[in-house]
Image (cartoon, grey):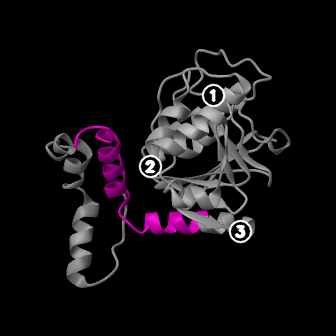
Amino acid sequence: MAEVEFHHEGRVAHVRLNRPEHLNAVTPEMDRLLAEVWAQINNDPDIWCAILSAAGDKAFCIGADMSERQDNPSRVAFGGGLTGIGGPLLTLKKPLIAAVQGFCVGGGFELAMCADIIVATEAAEFGLPETKFGIIGECGVVHRAVRQLPYRIAMAMILTGKRIDATSAAQFGLINEVVAMSELHDAAVLWATKINAASPLANQAAKAAVLARLNDPLELALSTRFELIERYAESQDRREGELAAKEKRKPVWTGK
C-alpha cells in the first residue's frame, strides 16, 4: 500500500497521506514521493487544482517521523514537499486545498499552511509542540504561523505548545471552513469545483503574483509587472472570457 496516494479526477488532483497507524507522520520516502507528486501536478496542464488529504480519523499529519533518519540532503522537506525545511523550497503553482482532520501539528501544520484553502473537521487541532519537547531547528512552521495567525496567538503556540481548535482557527482566519468529519471530502471537492469554475491560467497567474510580492510593501507590489499575468492577456482563455461575457453564457475554459 502506497504511503502517498495520488490520482486525479477530471481537472482535480487528489494527494493523500496514507500512514494512519503512525498518524501520517512523514518519512523520508514519503517526502520523496510527495516531491514527485508536486512536480507532476505543476507540470501537467490538465490538472487545474489539487486536494491534499490524509487517511484515518485521528490525524492529518503530526510532522516528521522522528524514528527515521531525516538527514537526506536530497529531500524536499520534513513537512512533506512544500515547506523547504532542510531542502529546496518548492512552490505549488496550482491552487491547493488541504482537508484536515484530527491532529495537525508540527511539520503537518506547516504542510497545511502551504495550502491556499483549508477545510477542517470540527475535531481538528493545530499546534506547534516542538519547544515543549525541547526540539527546534530551522523551523519553517514558526515563520509561516506568525504570518498566517495574529502575532500573539502564534507566539503563544510556539512558546507553550498550546494547540488551537478548528473553531478558533476559523476565527483567526487560518482556515476557511469547519465541517463534520463525514462532510470533509465533499467540502474539499466543492472548493475545487468553485476554483475550477474560474480560468485556470488566471488562477495560476494570480497565485504567482500574490506569492511573489506577499511580504513586500504594497507600493512595490502595485508597481510590479508579472510575467504570467502578461502572458495570460494573450491566452485563449482570456478571449473566451470576453466572448462568454458578450454572449451572456458561462465560459468554457481550456487552460490555453
Q: Amino acid at mark 1?
A: Phe
Classify residue 100 by image quadrant. bottom right
**Is residue 214 in the magenta section?**
yes
Q: Nearer the viewer, residue 169 or 98?
A: 169
The residue carrying mark 3 is: 180
Q: Nearer the viewer, residue 216 or 127?
A: 127
Residue 78: give its label: 1
In the image, what residue occupies the spot 26% across and 60% down?
236
Is residue 44 shown above or below 34? below
SS category of the residue bearing label 3: loop
In the image, what residue occupies the spot 62% across and 62% down?
167
Q: Amino acid at mark 3?
A: Ala
Q: Would residue 196 appear left or right of 59 to someone viewing this image?
A: left
**Is residue 197 in the magenta section?**
yes
Q: CA distance from mark 3 to mark 2?
A: 26 Å
Query: Marks 2 and 3: in contact by CB < 8 Å?
Result: no
In the image, what residue occupies the spot 45% across and 64% down?
196
Q: Nearer the viewer, mark 1 or mark 3?
A: 3
Residue range corresponding to the magenta coloring:
188-217
Q: Amino acid at mark 2?
A: Lys
Lower sequence index among marks 1 and 3 = 1
SS category of the residue bearing label 2: loop
| Residue count near mark 3 (Cα–Cα under 10 Å), binned few <14, some 14–19, many ≥20 | few
Please state the horizontal and vertical placement of residue 116, each as a whole percent of the image. Answer: 47, 52
Q: Nearer the viewer, residue 202 or 240?
A: 202
Residue 94: give its label: 2
Q: Nearer the viewer, mark 2 or mark 1?
A: 1
Q: Nearer the viewer, mark 3 or mark 2?
A: 3
| Residue count near mark 2 (Cα–Cα under 10 Å), binned few <14, some 14–19, many ≥20 | many
Please state the horizontal and vertical placement of residue 230, each as a whole percent of the image. Answer: 19, 49
